[in-house]
Amino acid sequence: MFHVEKMEADDVPFAVQLSNTMNWNMTPADFKFMMKLEPDGCFVLFNDQLRLGIATSISFGKAGWFGNLVVKEESRREGAGKLLTMHAVNYLKKIGVKTVGLFAYPHLVNFYKKVGFKSDIDFIVLKGNSTISKPQDILAQAKKRDVSEIIAFDKQCFGADRRKLLEPILLDPNNLCYISTEKGSITGYIVAKVSGKTAEVGPLICSANHEEETVLLLETILSRLNGVEIFIYIPKKEAELLKMLTRAGLKEDFYVIRMFLGSAFSKNCICTAESLERG
């Protein structure tokens, strides 16, 4: 009989193995990070004692995000995915989340619609190696003293307080962060989470109508990532940024659809995703 349990440390090898049947390139560190961020929001689906699937979620006050969902192929179409999804959604609602977001592969949009999610906008997943050289205009690299202001700026744009996610990312010495400012106040920032020879670029958050600053933020961080395989998740509607990234050497890999259960957030700025699993 199906039942869902909180993910524990001894579930991590299964979570990694199952996730990577989907070519997600997940590592034990990825799941340990998720479990640290949201200890009660990561789940394993069992049939008696047999592990069959996993799901992750994270809360940011009244906003939440539903992340990795994968079920063993032989258990799909038996209600396992819906059970995991609703378990995570109900967990988020129980702790006060009003709106849940997710990124859906195109073939799963109807599945999520059946449990109440509505489509918002498409995001393009780009990957590749940057060929950009250092721009003439140099932006400031963020310092530890900038972290609180970055998080406050992010809250204005994203629509929720992501401190518990952003603070460890910003304070990790392996990562990169650059900021743009106007009259002493932050108007944009960009982060690259670097792990060996790969980097996930995001979030990139910039005030609306600051497209030139957005381009400069991207050029600055990409110029620091030569020789590194880069992944970035960007709204399809940002056509000029997509052209710039294509010229920089990145190529479209696939696309996903952002969906919300509840009122949409992250509407007021130019925003790329932090990750597919956390929004």
Image (cartoon, grey):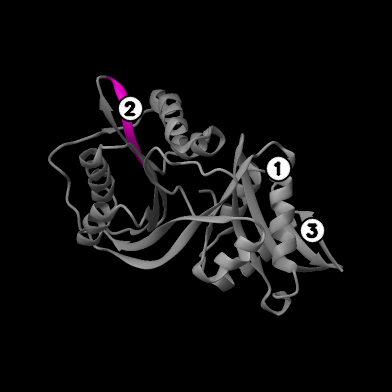
- First in sequence, mark 1 or 2: give its number: 1
Amino acid type indicated by mark 1: Lys
Q: CA distance from mark 3 to mark 1?
A: 17 Å
Residue 222: where, in percent of width, then height?
Answer: 27, 50
Crowdedness near tag 1: few (<14), some (14–19) or many (≥20) residues, C-alpha within 10 Å? some
Residue 109 located left or right of residue 135? right
Can you tell which of label 1 and label 2 is closer to the viewer? Answer: 1
Residue 144: where, in percent of width, then height?
Answer: 41, 27
Mark 2 sits on what residue?
186
Q: Which residue corresponds to the image point at 23% horizontal and 38% vertical from the top-left? A: 213
Along the viewing direction, whichever of 52 and 122 lies nearer the viewer? 122
Q: Are marks 2 and 3 in contact (CB under 8 Å)?
A: no
Asked whether 40 falls inside the magenta stretch, the response is no
Q: Secondary structure at mark 3?
A: strand
Give the magenta-colored segment's residue range.
184-190
Q: CA distance from mark 2 to mark 3?
A: 43 Å
- Whether residue 188 is visible here, answered yes or no, is yes
Mark 1 sits on what residue?
93
Q: Which residue corresponds to the image point at 36% horizontal and 28% vertical from the top-left? A: 143
Residue 189: where, in percent of width, then height?
Answer: 34, 36
Amino acid type indicated by mark 2: Ile
Mark 3 sits on what residue?
4
- Whether residue 9 is visible here, answered yes or no, is no
